[in-house]
Amino acid sequence: MKPDLSLAGLSAHKHTFTLPLNYDDPQGKKIQVFARELTLPDADTGSNERPFLVFFQGGPGFGAVRPVVNSGWIKRALTEFRVLLLDQRGTGLSTPVSYLSLAHFNSEQQAQYLSHFRADNIIRDAETIREQLCPGQKWSIIGQSFGGFCVLKYLNDAPSGLKEAYITGGLPSLTRSADEVYQATYQRVLAKNHDFFTRFSDAQELVTQLAEHISHHDVRIATGERLTVEMLQLLGINIGMEQGPEAVYYLLEHALIDTDIGTHVNPLFLAQFCQMLDFNTNPIFALLHESIYCQQTASNWSAQRVRAQYDEFNYEFGKDFLFTGEMVYPWFFEQFTNLKPLKHAANLLATKNDWSTLYNLDTLANNQVPVAAAIYSEDMFVEMRYSLETTKQVGNLKYWLTSEYEHNGIRMDGEHILDRLIALNRGTQLR
């Protein structure tokens, strides 16, 4: 355990664990998984004796939050827990996944390696870490977005290690296929587009002008790729977030500039555009996103196939421009520089039809671990109707349905959200 004293208002320690890539072959290839432990700095609080609360980040394919101050949900959690921020395998300071780290494999080996980075092994990692950090003790867990999928998998596979569980904006269906999920989420994205273009009356004109310009000019974003219309549509992943619509609109406002030699795309836009998309920097998101819905089935590029049912998203001159959402398409691996070397592996993963079953309905129906979930009725990423179905299929689960927050509500008002969920889980009054 290494000290990390750089966090204002917090005491932090770093942990690195050497774990099996494949738990069916525990003596085989190893990976490292990193976790950051946060406590209150005052020794008089007894914080080092408090139970753990483990955070599962959204994604898949993103490292845990890097706190800079004691605020938000972490502030609330630290009043009674030690917080463990887990960099799920392949992310953050854990053994990384990138085109560089996979370059020594052929495509088939890449796909085989990546098949070990779903929620089942994330939970195996967490259980192994629990046995090392607090042997014989149960801990509490919280999951945001895909982290909520991990929470359900934990309840399914290793409930004996858990005292209680919390889910924010990530209560998935236990049975719905990827196609069903995308049919629902495309409808949500259409609604968010309507809200966005109604709210910002000149946004359609701004983005249409930009789409037409890049259709006729070779415009390169800051990372070197040509900016295409379908790539521009990906900004829509932000319109389902708190403060995301504003960020997209302000970006569009300065997209085009007039100069003495004609109209050009603003270099500021090209730099900020890259910062709003994560596909070059977090490849697991593109490689394994659809697999989070797969149980003994292949996704076969579900989002791309379902999109064919929604011609509105196919932009043409004279037609309204629409953003897409949290969808992954095969052309990512032709247009994004850091994904191109992984194209064949991505296709192998998309056609893999022997993914393990994620959930046992009988096990979850008889769940004894207290679970509290925040379900956001306007969530663009996790369909409310399917989350409500799941509330009827998981025992001992209480939920809070609200329209107050978008998908990333925990980032905006995390202290209140976690406080409310703790009270809900324990049957107590809000502080």
Image (tube, grey):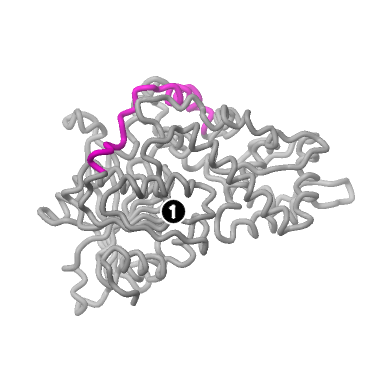
Answer with left or right where residue 327 lies relative to residue 32. Answer: right
Q: Position of residue 360 (x, y in %)?
A: 27, 36
Q: Secondary structure at mark 1?
A: loop
Disc 1 marks a residue whose amino acid type is: Gly
- Please report the residue visible at 42 percent of the width from the left and 42 percent of the height from the top: 61
- Please report the residue visible at 40 percent of the width from the left and 56 percent of the height from the top: 168
**How many neighbours does mark 1 have within 10 angstroms: few (below 14), some (14-19), or many (20 or more)?**
many
Quarter of the figure with the C terminus: bottom left
**Which quadrant of the view contains residue 52?**
bottom left
Answer with left or right where residue 338 lies relative to residue 192. Answer: left
Q: Position of residue 35 (x, y in %)?
A: 29, 53
Is residue 349 shown above or below 60?
above
Q: Is residue 350 magenta?
A: yes
The residue lying furthest to the bottom in this view is: 44
Q: Is residue 19 magenta?
A: no
Label 1: which residue?
169
Is residue 109 shown above or below 276?
above
**Which quadrant of the view contains residue 373?**
bottom left
Which residue occupies the foreground of this view, 362 or 92?
362
Q: Position of residue 85 (x, y in %)?
A: 32, 56
- Please report the residue visible at 76 percent of the width from the left and 38 percent of the height from the top: 214
The residue lying furthest to the right in this view is: 260
Q: Position of residue 412 (x, y in %)?
A: 49, 65
Is residue 65 shown above or below 328?
below
Q: Specify start and end residues of the magenta stretch as a single range.
A: 339-364
**Which quadrant of the view contains residue 397?**
bottom left
Answer with left or right where residue 294 lies relative to residue 376. Answer: left
Quarter of the figure with the N terminus: bottom left
Which residue occupies the foreground of this view, 148 or 276?
148
